[in-house]
C-alpha cells in the first residue's frame, strides 16, 4: 500500500467527511460553518490534479463536482460562463459545435497522474493554471479567464471581472485565482474567453538536430511572422538508467519514421494558408537542405495531443518535473542536467519537462537552485515512489512568500481552504 | 468644478511638518528633485481628468528604485500619503494629488534597460513612453502590442497601473497579457520582483494582481514587456452603413464567422463628421455608422480575410467599402479615429470622454439609450467604439463656463455607465476607476465584493497610505444608496477605513 493510500485511509474514513453541495449558497453555508468551527477543508472537483501540490489532511472535503453545467454561452460574444465543477470535456464539446475552443489547450492530467483520462473541471483548470503548447502564442489559462464567482474563507460569496475582454474595474482578482490551488476561494462559477478553432494544423519536423540548433530553430520560428502556435524539441533517445521516456514508442506516426532528435513547429489555419506558412518557414529558417518532413491534419493533431497530454511519461514511475525558464537559457541548463535526466523542450524552449529516476530531495533542490539562478522556476508535478514527498513543490522566495501570506489572510483569515496545499503556512 | 470628497486631510501635517518632510526627502534624493513652492506645484495639480484639481504637499522625482523605496519607507513610518504618477495622461483622476500627500513622479526613471531579442522582451523603467518601446525595436521588425491613443506620451509604468489597452486588444490583449515581469516597491519600502523573463510565474499571480491596480498596491519601478514580430501584411477596410443596426450586426457577424481582426473600430455619424472635418480622412459622410476593420497576418491571409469581411459587410447592407491600397492610406483611415478627441474639442469648448465596456451585441441598444439621454440632458454626444472588444467611448460635449454644466455632464456620463453595467458590461474598459467612477462601483459590485478588495489592499498597505481615495467608493455614499446595511447608525466592517 502506498503512503498516500494509507493517508487516505486514516483521514477519510467515511463519506461523512465529504460534502457535495448542490449550489453556491450551500458552498457558502458550509464554509461559513467551517470558519466558525475552525475546520480545515480540502476542495476537490474531479480529482484529476489532486496529486499536484502538497498532500492535504483536512477534516472535511468539499467536493464541487455537483456545481455542474453551462450557465451561458454566447459564441458571437466569445465567452462561456460555466459552473466551476463543469467537466472541461463537456465545455470543449459544446464549443466545438460552434468551431470554438479554449485556446490555452487544457491538459489531460488524468491519465498521466492516475492512469485514466480526465481533463478535470473548469475550476480545477483555473486553480492550477497549467497550459498546453500554444501558451507562448495565446497566453495561459489566466489570460482566458474573464471573471469568476466563488466563496472566500469566511463563507462570503464574492465575484470579480465580467464577460468582456476589456475590463479594468477594480483589482483583477480573476488572475489571482489562477494558480492559487484553491487556497483563496472555492470557485463556483468561471467565465472563459473562447476563440475560433483553426481549420487545420500542420507540423514541420526537422530531424536530427543538436540541442543548440534545435533550440535555435524554435526561437527563430516564433520570432518569424508565420504565426507559429507550437514549438517543441525532443532529443535523440538516450540510455539513462531508470528513465523510460521514449519518443519513438510514443510517436508511432506514419509520416514520422526516423530515430534521431525531433524539432517540431506547428502552424494552424486554413489549408492553403498553413501550406504557405510552412513553406515560408522552410525558406526563412534555411532548412530546405536538411532532413525535414511535414505532418498534416490528423497526424499533426495526434502529435500535439500527445505532446500536450504528456504521453511520453505514461509508463514512468519516476519523478516528473516542470521547469519554466527564459528560453535563452535552455541549452546551458540542459547541459547541466541532461546526463542524469530525460527531458524535452516545449513552449519554444521556455518550458522543460524532466523525468528523473531515483531523484532525492537534495537533487531536486540542486535543480531548483540552478533554475532559480537563471530566472526560472520549478514544480514537482508527479512524485515517485522513491521520493513520495518534497517539502517545496513550488518555487517561491521570501518576499513573495510574505506577500502571498498577507493575501491569503485577506481571503481566508483562518486558513481553512486547502491549507498548506502550496506552501507550509499558506 | 464639482466637489469631490477625499480622505480626511491631515492639517497638522500641512501646517507643521512640510519643512521637516522636505529636509528628510533631501537626505534621500537630490534637492533639485523636490518641489515644494506653490508655483512649482501647480503643474501637478491634475492629470488628464482636468475637471478635478488639487495641489499636493510636495512633488518628488526619485532617480532610482532605492530612492523610491526610501521615500515610501519614510512616508510609511511617518504616515504620509503618497500618490504615484507616471506621465499624468490618465483620464480617471488616478494621479489626482491629495492636499496632504507627496506626489511621487516616476518620470526620471526613463531608461530602456535591456532589449533582449532572444527572449523577445524589453526591460524598461516606468517612465519610458509606450511608443518609445516600439521605436526601440522596430528596426528589427518587432513591436509592443498595446497601443493606447495616448501612446506618444503615456508611460509604461502608468500602462501597467491602469492595464491599458488600445485598438488592438481583441487580438493581442491588454497590458496584462503583454508583460512578463515587474519590479515593484511596496508601501513599507520592500523591493520585490514579480515574474521575470518567463511565461507565468508560480504561486499567486501577483503580476496579474498589480496590473490594473491603479497605484493602490505598490509603485512600479521596472517593467519587462513582451515584444512581437510585426505581421507581414496589414490592411484596413473602411465600411459605411446607413443604419447603426446594420453596422452592429456586421460587427457581430464578423466575430461569429471566426475572424479575429487586429482592430475593429466603429464611429457614429456625429464623430464621422467631426473627425473628417478635422483631418479629411475621406470618411463616408452620408453614413450613419462607419467601421474600420484592420486585418493582419501573411499577405495571403490578409487577402483571404479582407474578402470574407467584404462579403459579410455586403450581406449586412454596407453603403460603402474602401480597402487600403497602401500603408499611407491605411494610416489615413486611422488618422480620423485617432483624432477623435481633438476633433470633438474643435466642436465644443469642452468634452467629457466616457469609457465603458459592453457585450458587442448590445451596441445598438446602448447607443439608442445614449441618444435618449443626450436629449434628456440636452448635450450633444459623439460615439467612438472599439467594436472588437466592446469598449465604448461616448464623448459628451459641453461648455464648462455654463453654470452647472460639468455636474450635468457627469450625471449624463454616470447614467451611461450604469446602463453599460445593466446590459452586462463593466464601468471601465481601459481608463480605470480613479476618482471619476469611484462612486459607481456599487453599481457593479456588492458590499462583499468591495470589502474583499479593500481587505486585499490593506493586506499590502496596512495604513492605506498609497493613493487613498481612489477606486473604492466612500462607504457613506454606498450606505446612502442603501447598499450597505446600516443598523441604528452602526455600519458593518468598522475595521475598514472610511474615506
Image: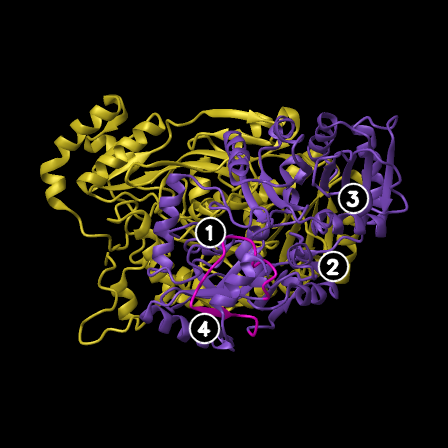
User: Chain B is which colour?
Assistant: yellow
Residue wearing tag 2: B257
Report the chain shown in purple.
A
In the rendered image, residues at marks 2 and 4 fall on the same chain: no
In the rendered image, residues at marks 1 and 2 fall on the same chain: no
For label 4, count other residues whose C-alpha is less than 10 Å away and answer few (under 14), some (14-19) or many (20+).
many
**Residue A359 or residue A381, whichever sits in front:** A359
**Disc 1 from disc 3: Cα separation:** 45 Å
Residue wearing tag 4: A27
Disc number for residue A14: none
Disc number for residue B301: 3
Q: In the image, which is nearer the foreground, mark 1 or mark 3?
A: 1
Residue positioned most to the front: A1
**Disc 4 from disc 1: Cα separation:** 22 Å
Left or right relative to A256: residue B465: left
For label 3, count other residues whose C-alpha is less than 10 Å away and answer few (under 14), some (14-19) or many (20+).
many
Amino acid at each position: 500500500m502506498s503512503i498516500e493510500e494509507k493517508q487516505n485511509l486514516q483521514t477519510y474514513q467515511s463519506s461523512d467527511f465529504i460534502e457535495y453541495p448542490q449550489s453556491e449558497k450551500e458552498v457558502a453555508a458550509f464554509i461559513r460553518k467551517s470558519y466558525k468551527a475552525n475546520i480545515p477543508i480540502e476542495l476537490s472537483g474531479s480529482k484529476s490534479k489532486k496529486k499536484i501540490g502538497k498532500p492535504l489532511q483536512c477534516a472535511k472535503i468539499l467536493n464541487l463536482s455537483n456545481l455542474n453545467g453551462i450557465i451561458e454561452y454566447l459564441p458571437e460574444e466569445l465567452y462561456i460562463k460555466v459552473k466551476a465543477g463543469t467537466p472541461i470535456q463537456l465545455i470543449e464539446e459544446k464549443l466545438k459545435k460552434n468551431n470554438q475552443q479554449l485556446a490555452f489547450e487544457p491538459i489531460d492530467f488524468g491519465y498521466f497522474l492516475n492512469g485514466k483520462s480526465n481533463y478535470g473541471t473548469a475550476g480545477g483548470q483555473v486553480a492550477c493554471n497549467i497550459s498546453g503548447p500554444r501558451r507562448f502564442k495565446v497566453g495561459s489559462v489566466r489570460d482566458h479567464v474573464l471573471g469568476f464567482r466563488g466563496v472566500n474563507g469566511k463563507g462570503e460569496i464574492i465575484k470579480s471581472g465580467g464577460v468582456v475582454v476589456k475590463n479594468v474595474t477594480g483589482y483583477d482578482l480573476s488572475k489571482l485565482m489562477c494558480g492559487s490551488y484553491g487556497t483563496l476561494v472555492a470557485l463556483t462559477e468561471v467565465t472563459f474567453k473562447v476563440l475560433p478553432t483553426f481549420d487545420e494544423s500542420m507540423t514541420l519536423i526537422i530531424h536530427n538536430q543538436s540541442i543548440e540548433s534545435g533550440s535555435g530553430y524554435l526561437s527563430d520560428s516564433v520570432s518569424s511572422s508565420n504565426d507559429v502556435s507550437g514549438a517543441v524539441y525532443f532529443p535523440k533517445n538516450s540510455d539513462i538508467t531508470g528513465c523510460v521516456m521514449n519518443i519513438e514508442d510514443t510517436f508511432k506516426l506514419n509520416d514520422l519514421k526516423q530515430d534521431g532528435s525531433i524539432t517540431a513547429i506547428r502552424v494552424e489555419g486554413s489549408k492553403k494558408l498553413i501550406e504557405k506558412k510552412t513553406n515560408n518557414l522552410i525558406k526563412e529558417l534555411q532548412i530546405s537542405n536538411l532532413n525535414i518532413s511535414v505532418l498534416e491534419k490528423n497526424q499533426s493533431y495526434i502529435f500535439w495531443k500527445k505532446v500536450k497530454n504528456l504521453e511520453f511519461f505514461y509508463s514512468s514511475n519516476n519523478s516528473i518535473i516542470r521547469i519554466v525558464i527564459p528560453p535563452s537559457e535552455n541549452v546551458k541548463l540542459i547541459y547541466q542536467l541532461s546526463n542524469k535526466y530525460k527531458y524535452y523542450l516545449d513552449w519554444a524552449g521556455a518550458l522543460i519537462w524532466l523525468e528523473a529516476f531515483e531523484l532525492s530531495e537534495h537533487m531536486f533542490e540542486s535543480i531548483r537552485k540552478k533554475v532559480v539562478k537563471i530566472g526560472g522556476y520549478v514544480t514537482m508535478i508527479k512524485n515517485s515512489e522513491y521520493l513520495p514527498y518534497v517539502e517545496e513543490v513550488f518555487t517561491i522566495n521570501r518576499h513573495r512568500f510574505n506577500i502571498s501570506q498577507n493575501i491569503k489572510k485577506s481571503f481566508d483569515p483562518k486558513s481553512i481552504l486547502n491549507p498548506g496545499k502550496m506552501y507550509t503556512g499558506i | 468644478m464639482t466637489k469631490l470628497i477625499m480622505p480626511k486631510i491631515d492639517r497638522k501635517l500641512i501646517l507643521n511638518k512640510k519643512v521637516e518632510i522636505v529636509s528628510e526627502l533631501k537626505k534621500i534624493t537630490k534637492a533639485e528633485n523636490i518641489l515644494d513652492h506653490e508655483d512649482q506645484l501647480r503643474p501637478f495639480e491634475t492629470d488628464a481628468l482636468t475637471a478635478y484639481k488639487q495641489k499636493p504637499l510636495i512633488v518628488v522625482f526619485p532617480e532610482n528604485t532605492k530612492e523610491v523605496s526610501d521615500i515610501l519607507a519614510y512616508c510609511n513610518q511617518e504616515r504620509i500619503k503618497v500618490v504615484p504618477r507616471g506621465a499624468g495622461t490618465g483620464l480617471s483622476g488616478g494621479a489626482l494629488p491629495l492636499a496632504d500627500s507627496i506626489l511621487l513622479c516616476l518620470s526620471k526613471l526613463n531608461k530602456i534597460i535591456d532589449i533582449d531579442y532572444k527572449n523577445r522582451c524589453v526591460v524598461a523603467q516606468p517612465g519610458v513612453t509606450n511608443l518609445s518601446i516600439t521605436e526601440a525595436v522596430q528596426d528589427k521588425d518587432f513591436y509592443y502590442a498595446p497601443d493606447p491613443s495616448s501612446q506618444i506620451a503615456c508611460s509604461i509604468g502608468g500602462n501597467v497601473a491602469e492595464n491599458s489597452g488600445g485598438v488592438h486588444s481583441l487580438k493581442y490583449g491588454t497590458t496584462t497579457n503583454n508583460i512578463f515581469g515587474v519590479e515593484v516597491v511596496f508601501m513599507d519600502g520592500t523591493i520585490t520582483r514579480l515574474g521575470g523573463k518567463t511565461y507565468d510565474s508560480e504561486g499567486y499571480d501577483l503580476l496579474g494582481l498589480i496590473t490594473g491596480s491603479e497605484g493602490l498596491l505598490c509603485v512600479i519601478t521596472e517593467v519587462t514587456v513582451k515584444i512581437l514580430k510585426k505581421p507581414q501584411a496589414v490592411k484596413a477596410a473602411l465600411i459605411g452603413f446607413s443604419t447603426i443596426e446594420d453596422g452592429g450586426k456586421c460587427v457581430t457577424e464578423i466575430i461569429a464567422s471566426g475572424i479575429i481582426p487586429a482592430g475593429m473600430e466603429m464611429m457614429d455619424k456625429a464623430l464621422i463628421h467631426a473627425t473628417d472635418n478635422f483631418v479629411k480622412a475621406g470618411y463616408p459622410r452620408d453614413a450613419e455608422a462607419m467601421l474600420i476593420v484592420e486585418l493582419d497576418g501573411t499577405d495571403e491571409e490578409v487577402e483571404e480575410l479582407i474578402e470574407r469581411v467584404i462579403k459579410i459587410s455586403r450581406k449586412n447592407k454596407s453603403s460603402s467599402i474602401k480597402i487600403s491600397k497602401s500603408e499611407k492610406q491605411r494610416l489615413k483611415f486611422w488618422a480620423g479615429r485617432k483624432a477623435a478627441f481633438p476633433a470633438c474639442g474643435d466642436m465644443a469648448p469642452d468634452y467629457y470622454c466616457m469609457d465603458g465596456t459592453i457585450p458587442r451585441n448590445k451596441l445598438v441598444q446602448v447607443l439608442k439609450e445614449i441618444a435618449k439621454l443626450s436629449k434628456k440632458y440636452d448635450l450633444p454626444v459623439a460615439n467612438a467604439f472599439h467594436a472588437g472588444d466592446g469598449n465604448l467611448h461616448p464623448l459628451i460635449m459641453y461648455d464648462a463656463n455654463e453654470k452647472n454644466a460639468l455636474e450635468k455632464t457627469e450625471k449624463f456620463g454616470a447614467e451611461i455607465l450604469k446602463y453599460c453595467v445593466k446590459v452586462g458590461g463593466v464601468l471601465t474598459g481601459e481608463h480605470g476607476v480613479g476618482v471619476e467612477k469611484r462612486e459607481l462601483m456599487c453599481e457593479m459590485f456588492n458590499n462583499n465584493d468591495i470589502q474583499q478588495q479593500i481587505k486585499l489592499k490593506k493586506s499590502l498597505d496596512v495604513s492605506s497610505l498609497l493613493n487613498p481615495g481612489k477606486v473604492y467608493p466612500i462607504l457613506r455614499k454606498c450606505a446612502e444608496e442603501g447598499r450597505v446595511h446600516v443598523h441604528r447608525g452602526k455600519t458593518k466592517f468598522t475595521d475598514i477605513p472610511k474615506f
